[in-house]
Amino acid sequence: MDELDNAPEKEPVDNTPARGERALETARGAARGAAATLRSGIAAMRDVRNASRRHSSARSLLREMSEALSADEATLARREEVAADYEQIVEEQSAVVAESSSEVARQRELVERARSQREALETQLDQLRKDHEQELRPYKRIVEAARGRSEEAARGVSEAKRAVRSAENQVKDATERREQGISSANRAIDASQGRLRKVQDALSRARDEHADGSALKQLQNEVATELAHVEAARAEVATVTHDTQSAVDAAQTHLWTQKKSLEEAQREADAAKREYEARKQEYDERSARAHDAEEDLEDKIAALRRDEDDAKVAHDEAAERHDEAQALLDEAEQVHATPEETERLRASIAEQRVEVEAQQGVVDDLAEGERSLRVSTRGSRLALLAAAVAVVALIVVIVVLLVTR
């Protein structure tokens, strides 16, 4: 017991590498099983895809054969219809060809006639426009000259009106200066007379008071002086009145002259305006007559152009009827001349119908085979998807184990 008790304890065994090996082996086995499932599923998918391709190719071939058969059947039906109505077609379409040929020729003649007349009128219109332009050019110059004279005369009236207004202002200024001058001179007289009365009153009082001789002499001299001032002021009133009245008379004379000039300028402007209006009216009347003549030709040209266009339309319609009728005639003649082609086509259609029926059988068989194959491999194809998911999961596990090892 003591020995056992004293014996050294054994260290625990690490089994991690063994467990990793077993897990790796298990993963390899699962991977091999998944690979087998993948191979089986992939083969099933390939078989289904090949069957679908064969079925699709057979359907495409069947469609092409059916379309070719339908086209040949339509061709045969048309040939049989034409062959049955051959005489009627020849009779009716020959009449249409003859009638449309005549109509084409007639409409072509109408087109050429309308074009020729239109071109002649267009030449005439060009010459007429040149003649009118040359004819109206002198009258246009006369109108322009008259308009220039009228405008110049109107400017003269404006200048004369400005001169009259200036003369009126001069009269007004001269009148105001006259009134101011006379008023100023009259005020000077009134002032002189007032001073004279004061000196005379002083002299009268001095005499009554028996003033000395020298005082009286002085007052008498002042009275004489003021009398002279009054006479001078009265003379100034006459002079100012005469001078300012002369200025007013001169201003009024100048105003009268300017008004006469304005009247003359207005008469000339009115005459120039009447001349311009008369010349312009004459030019406008001649221009209107020329325009009417040109417009008349333009209307005729437009009518001929419409006739030309209508004839072209009728020509094209007749040509189209001719071509259609001729094509039907050619077709009838070709079918009538080649009955063996109709028989060959009929035999070919019979063979094609057999081939189409056979191909339809092939398509049905391939469709059934594809459906059966899809049913029988459904499990393998579903397992393919599951196996693919499992393989991805196993790869993840392996990578994790290798990393942790």
Image: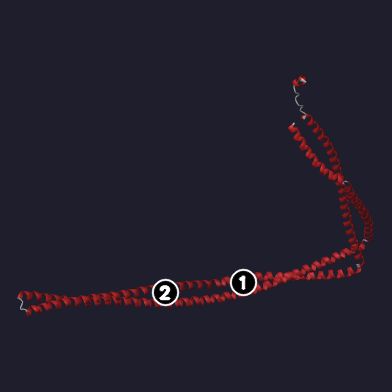
Residue 332 spot, x, y in % from top left:
89, 64
Judge the density around disc 1: few (<14), some (14-19), many (≥20) Cα neighbours within 10 Å: some
Residue that sits furthest to the front in the current view: 1
Name the residue rendered at 11%, 77% in the picture.
Answer: 202
Query: Crowding near pointer 2: few (<14 within 10 Å), some, many (20+)?
Result: many
- Amino acid on which disc 1 is placed: Leu
Residue 128: x and y, percent? 61, 72
Which label number is shown at residue 157? 2
Q: Is residue 309 above or below residue 267?
A: above
Which mark, by number, is residue 147? Answer: none
> Which secondary structure lies at badge 2?
helix
What residue do we see at 17% from left, 76% from top? 192
Q: Name the quadrant of the N terminus.
A: top right
Front position in the image: 385 or 15 = 15
Residue 227 shows up from this direction: no
Q: Label 2 to label 1, Cα distance in Å?
A: 43 Å
Does residue 108 appear to the left or right of 156 in the view shown? right
Percent position of residue 285, x then y: 56, 77
Mark sitting earlier along the chain (2/1):
1
> Which quadrant would residue 390 be assigned to in this image?
top right
Q: Quadrant of the C terminus?
A: top right
Residue located at (71% from left, 69% from top):
115
Q: Is residue 152 left or right of residue 23?
A: left
Report the residue marked by disc 1. Answer: 128
Disc 2 residue type?
A: Val
Mark 1, secondary structure of its residue: helix
